[in-house]
Amino acid sequence: MIFGKLLYADDLKIFRVIKSILDCTALQTDLNITSQWCSDNGMQINITKCKVITFNRGMSPINHVYSINTTPPECVQSIRDLGVVSDSKLTITVKAFSVLGFIRRNASQFTDIYALKALFCTLVRSTLEYASPIWSPHHVAQVIHIERV
């Protein structure tokens, strides 16, 4: 089972691969343990900043109502994290194609290949590489999408 926690400054993400209702229960246990740890150490969780997002490419995701201190966090379809917007279907390559189209339209007069490469690396490739730990492209179809960009 894949589960974990990601920390950045005062931001914590708790995640788990959900394949059954038992996995949902395990994630709720993770939330309870984290909440109890915060309480024991004099920290308060700002529930208004807590979100639940389900990343799923299938037709029928397992939906579960989670809670933090008996309050359910908001369920969202997309989330912005460190400048990268991820939706529930993880359509990162759509954004990369959009930015690539912007470059093609607005830099069509550029003749300096190094300037074009700098634009591509800065605006397109950085998006794909920065977000890759989140969406972890390891299936052939995902890799093909990236290579098309």
Image: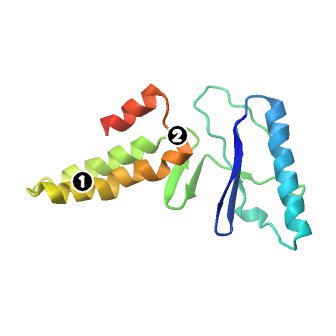
Task: Please tell me how crowded label 2 is: few (under 14), some (14-19), or many (20+) other residues with Cα within 10 Å.
Answer: few
Judged from the image, the secondary structure of the residue bearing numbered disc 1 is helix
* Residue 87 visible in the displayed image: yes
Rendered location of residue 48, percent (x, y): 74, 64
* Residue 65 visible in the displayed image: no
Residue drawn where x is 78% and y is 28% of the image:
20
Rendered location of residue 66, percent (x, y): 81, 46
Residue drawn where x is 73% and y is 29% of the image:
19
Using the image as rendered, state which of residue 37 and residue 56 is in the foreground.
37
Q: Quadrant of the C terminus?
A: top left
Rendered location of residue 115, percent (x, y): 17, 60
Judged from the image, the secondary structure of the residue bearing numbered disc 2 is loop
On screen, residue 59 above or below 130: above
Residue picked out by circle 1: 103
Which amino acid, mark 1?
Answer: Ile
Residue drawn where x is 62% and y is 25% of the image:
59
On screen, residue 116 above or below 92: below
Residue picked out by circle 2: 136
Q: Which mark is residue 46?
A: none
Figure label count: 2
